[in-house]
Image (spheres, rainbow, N blue to C red):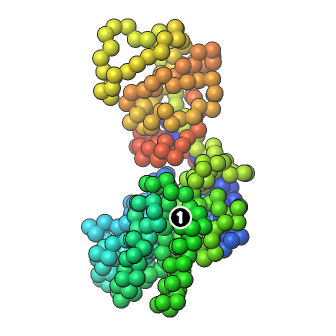
Amino acid sequence: MYPKVLVDLKKVEENTKIVAQACAEKGVEIMGVTKVFCGAKEIAEAEMKGGIKYFADSRIENLVKLKDFDLPKVLLRLPMISQVDDVVQYADISLNSELKTIEALNIAAMAKKKIHRIILMIDLGDLREGILPAQFDETVQAILKMDNIMLHGIGVNLTCYGGVVPNEDNLGQLADFAKHVKDQYNHHLEIVSGGNSSSFYLLPQGRLPQGITNLRMGEILVLGRETAYGELVEGMHDDAFIFEAEIIELKEKDTVPTGEIGMDAFGNKPSFVDKGKRMRAIMAAGRQDVDPTTLIPLDERIELFGSSSDHMMWDVTGCGYKVGDIVQFKLEYGSILSLFTSEYIGKEYK
Ligand SMILES: *Cc1c(COP(=O)(O)O)cnc(C)c1O
C-alpha cells in the first residue's frame, strides 16, 4: 500500500544504543519518547532493545498500546484532571506542575489502592510547563503530605517553546534543587530529568552537570540528531524513516497556470516562477498526510512545485521516471509525526 512509511528497526535500535551508552557512561538513564510515532509497538520495542529504561509519551492512548511491555510508562504531558483515573491506571509516572491536578491524582490513586509517582516540572526559562522556582518549597511540602503520591523526581523542559538551550547554568539549577530536597526534606529523588534531545550535546563535551540522572529522548533516537543545534550525531542514522509515494501522473506542462489567478485549494493566492515547460510528476499524497515542504527527496534532482490536500506536484525534469514509480523521501520530526497520525499512510517495518 502507498503512500507508506518504511521504518528500519535496526537503525532505530542502533541510534538508541549509541545514545543510551553515551548516557550510561555518565550515570544517566534515558526514557524513549514514543509520541512522534504514536506509540507504535514495533519501534518502541527497537528502542527497548537499544537500552531505554522507560517509555514516555504525551498521550495516554499511546501508553495503553505499550501496556504489555515490561518497562515503566511515563506520561509526559501534564495530566488533564478529567483523565486522572486513566493516568493512574496506565502511567506509572506522570510529569506535573499543578497542585490541583496532583491532588486529583492522589484521590484517584487512593481509590485504586496505588501509589502514583510524579516528576515535578520546574520552569527554568523556556516558558512551557513547570512551576516557577519561587514556588518550589511550598509545592514540595504539599506533595510530600499526600499519601498516595510519591515525589519520584524533578525535571525541566527546554528548547520547546522558548528555544532555550540547556547548559551548566539551567541544568545546574535543576541539580541544586534535587540536592536541596535531600538536605531540607531528607527525601531522595530517583529521577532528575534534565530535558530532551537538546541536552545530548552536553554529554560528549563533558558538560552535563553532576546530579542529572535522566534524559527524555525522542527526536534523537528516530532522526539521529541532537536538537540544540541540529547536528547529526556521529555514527547515527537520519534515514531510519523513509516515506514512499507513487507517481500517478507524469506530463510535461507549463510552470505558470493559464487563466485568471484566484485562490488555491487552501485559500491562498499562489505565485509562480516561469521556468518554461517542465516534466511534472503528481504523487498520490498531500497535505492531509504531511506538509510536503518538509519532505527531503533522496533523489536530489527533484524539486517541489506545490501541493493540495491529496496531491503533490514535483519537478522531475530529466529524471526518467515513469507513471507508477515510487519516490522516496527522508523525513523531519514534523513529517514523521503527521504521517504516523494519518490512517491513510501504510507503516512497514523491516
Ligand atoms: C516531546 C517531549 C520530549 C522529547 O523531546 P525530543 O526533543 O523529541 O527529544 C521530552 N519531554 C517532554 C516533556 C516532551 O513533551
Residue 278 makes an appearance in the image: yes
Counting from the top left corner in percent of width and height, residue 294 is at: 51, 36
Counting from the top left corner in percent of width and height, residue 22 is at: 70, 64
How many discs appear? 1
Q: Nearer the viewer, residue 152 or 84?
A: 152
* The image quarter in which residue 94 lies: bottom left
Q: Nearer the viewer, residue 243 or 258?
A: 258
Name the amino acid type tagged 1: Gly
Q: Residue at x 39, y 27 (%)?
A: 308
Q: Residue at x 30, y 17 (%)?
A: 262
Label 1 CB less than 8 angstroms from ligand 1: yes
- The residue indicated by pointer 1 is 195
Q: Nearer the viewer, residue 156 or 314?
A: 156
* The image quarter in which residue 343 lies: top left
Q: Residue at x 63, y 23 (%)?
A: 301
Q: Nearer the viewer, residue 316 or 89?
A: 316
